[in-house]
Image: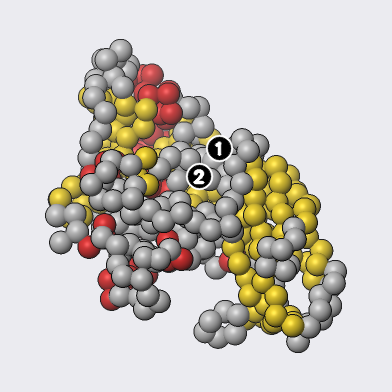
Amino acid sequence: MAVESEPKATGEDFSPVELALAARNHGFPLETLRYDITPLGLHYLLIHFDIPHVDVSVWRLEIGGAVSNPLSLSLDEIKERPKTSVAVTLECAGNGRARLSPRPLSQPWLDEAIGHAEWTGTPLAPLLEEAGIEDSAVEVLFTGLDRGVQGEVEHAYERSLPLDEAHRPELLLAYEANGQPLPPQHGFPLRLIVPGWYGMTHVKWLERITALTEPFEGYQQMKQYRTKQSEDELGEPVTRMLPRSLMIPPGIPDFPDRHRFLEPAPCLLEGRAWSGWAPVERVEVSTDGGETWADAELDDPVGDFGWRRWSYRWADVQPGEHELLCRATDGAGNTQPDEGDWNHGGYVNNAVQRVAVTVR
C-alpha cells in the first residue's frame, strides 16, 4: 500500500507511520543557525530506505550508458582526481510539510529539514567529459545503493538531471563532509552534491552514473517530488530551492511545546536565509504577527551556494504575547509567502516562519 503518497485526514495527531519516520530521520535544531557551517551531527537527515553497508574495497563507481568511453573507478582513483570543496545549504523538498492540512503520510517536517556543510570531492563535469557523453544523450541518471519499496514499486533510489545541469562546474562527487570522510548516513563512500537544488537531487551511496537517450521515468522522478493536486496528474517537478528565512528562536523555551519566553529588554533577532534561484537580497522581520515589517541587516553569504546571516534589533520589547515572523526575497524576485499552498506530496512549503513569544 502506497501510504507515503496518500494524504491523511485533517488533524493534529501524528500517525504511527509518521512517528516511525521521525524516529529514523532527524532535523536541525534551529538554535544551531548560529554556526556558519553545520556540525554533521546536527545536519538534517532523510533516508528513504536503509543505510547500505558498503565494502569500499570492492565498491566502484560505474559511468556508462550513452558514452563513448565507459569508466569504472574505485574510491582511491576518484580521490586521485582534482579535489575541491564547496559550502552548500541543503534543504529537504518536504520542509514545512507538517504544517499543511491535510498532510501526506511522510516525514513530518516543521521547519528543521536543513543544514549547511562543506562538501569535498571531485567535480562531476570532467568525468562526464572523459566518459564522452554522446550527442544522443538528453539526461544523466544517478543511482544509489539504497533500495526499497514505495508505492508498491521496488526500486533503487535514483534521480536524473538534464545535461546542462549535470555539466554545471559546481556539481560535485563528494567523499568528505566538513573535512571528514562521509559518514554512512550521509552517503558513504560517495554522494552527489547539486548546489541550489532541493535535497532529493543529492543522491547518496552513489554507485552508477548513466547517460540516457530518453527522459528518466523512474518512481522518484515521476511519482515523487512533483507538486500536484491529485495523485493522477503529472504535476510540476521540484527543482531549485525557493527562498526561505529562519530565525533562531529567542529567549528560553518551554518543554515540550517550545514556546519562547523573553525579558522586556532590547533583543537581537538573528537567523539565516537562502535560495537556489538567486542570492538572497532582502530579509524582513515582523514583531507583530505580520502587521508591519522592517528590513534586517544582511551579512555576506557563506560561499556562492550557502546561506546568508541576517540580524534585526528588536528595540521596543513590551510585556505580552508576540508573534515573530521573517521572510526572504531573492534576486530573482521570489519572496516567501505568508501561507503555503497545499499539494499532494507536501513539497516546497516555504511559508514564513512564525515564532510565538511571551514577554514577561
Q: Does the image show residue 264?
A: yes
Q: Which mark is residue 7?
A: none
Distance Cα–Cα, label 1 vs label 2: 7 Å
| Residue at position x 29%, y 19% in the image | 137
Tell me whether circle 1 and circle 2 mark residues in contact (CB < 8 Å): yes
Q: Does the image show residue 42?
A: no
- The image position of residue 225, as x and y in percent, is 35, 47
Give the mark, 1 or 2, whose residue is nearer the N terminus: 2
Is 121 left or right of 21, judged from the image as shown? right
Color style of the picture = secondary structure
- The image position of residue 219, as x and y in percent, is 23, 44
Q: Amino acid at mark 1?
A: Trp
- The image position of residue 156, as x and y in percent, is 21, 46
Closer-to-camera residue (57/346): 346
Q: Quadrant of the C terminus?
A: bottom right
Image quarter of residue 46: bottom left
| Residue at position x 68%, y 63% in the image | 290
Residue bearing the label numbered 2: 241
Assign a secondary structure to mark 2.
loop
- The image position of residue 178, as x and y in percent, is 54, 51
Q: Amino acid at mark 2?
A: Met
Is 27 left or right of 308, judged from the image as shown? left
| Residue at position x 36%, y 19% in the image | 130
Residue bearing the label numbered 1: 277
Is 221 left or right of 91, judged from the image as shown? left
| Residue at position x 65%, y 45% in the image | 329
